[in-house]
Image: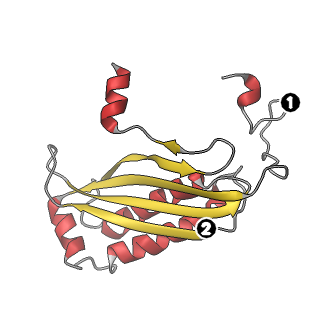
Amino acid sequence: MAENDLTHFNADGRARMVDVSEKNETDRTAVAEGTVYMLPATFERIRAGQIKKGDVLAVAQVAGIMGAKRTPDIIPMCHPLLLTGVDISFTEHPQPNADGQSAITVTASVKVHGQTGVEMEALTAVSVALLTIYDMCKAIDKGMTFGGVGLLKKTGGKSGTFIAPSRDERARAAR
């Protein structure tokens, strides 16, 4: 990567917020996901609505949406954006994996019509939703872990569409 490809640094090597005023406004989307791993008993209590703090997935869904909206407050060089849509969904994995853990995958889809993309908003939404699940369940399962947080797809803007390679494709490429 050439030095001038680092858009968040000025000529003196200091951080800067990128000037997007000359960029065209386009419809832009981003989809990200991440997974929280937990004891099967924790998973079952979430499913049964037996977590004392309340409906874990409902609270995590609202937290993810709030996280997307507040991204520029916590990621220093992100532009404040007027998001046109944020959707958080969950995929449950009740069957324990090889480590004996059940899981919940969080997927965030974010949209905007603007001059810069929403990848950071989608990633922040996923991260905040995952952290909220942890926060609501930590009293019974402090060993929860996270994995696979990443961008699945983005559309719009000058760079066009990006679709992340599957895990299998990444593993083959690494060989």
Report the number of discs: 2
Q: Gap between marks 2 and 1, in whole Å?
A: 31 Å
Classify residue 113 by image quadrant.
Answer: bottom right
The x and y percentages for residue 160 are 61, 44
Q: In this orientation, which residue lies closer to the viewer: 34 or 151?
A: 151
Residue 43 point in image, percent of width and height = 21, 65
Query: How far across and how far down the image is residue 167, in percent?
Result: 33, 37
Residue appearing at x 71%, y 49% in the figure: 77
Q: Which image quarter is the N terminus in?
A: top right
Q: Nearer the viewer, residue 60 or 115?
A: 115
The local crowd at label 2, few if under 14, some if 14 to 19, many if 20 or more residues have their Cα within 10 Å, is many
**Residue located beneath label 2 in the image:** 69
Q: Position of residue 68 (x, y in %)?
A: 57, 64
Mark 2: which amino acid?
Answer: Lys
Q: Is residue 112 visible?
A: yes
Say what amino acid the circle numbered 1 marks. Answer: Ala
Whether residue 56 sits left or right of residue 71 in the image: it is left
Q: Quadrant of the C terminus?
A: top left
Q: Which residue is labeled 1 in the image? A: 11
- Mark 1 surroundings within 10 Å by alpha-carbon count, few (fewer than 14), some (14 through 19), many (20 or more): few
- Residue drawn 64% across the image and 53% down it: 117
- Left or right: where 147 falls relative to 7: left
- Local secondary structure at mark 1: loop
Residue at the limit of the structure toward the top, as seen here: 175
Asked if residue 138 shows in the view, the reply is no
Residue at 74 percent across and 57 percent down: it is 25
Give the structural element (helix, strand or loop) at label 2: helix
First reached walking from the N terminus: tag 2 or tag 1 = 1
Q: Residue at x 25, y 63 (%)?
A: 92
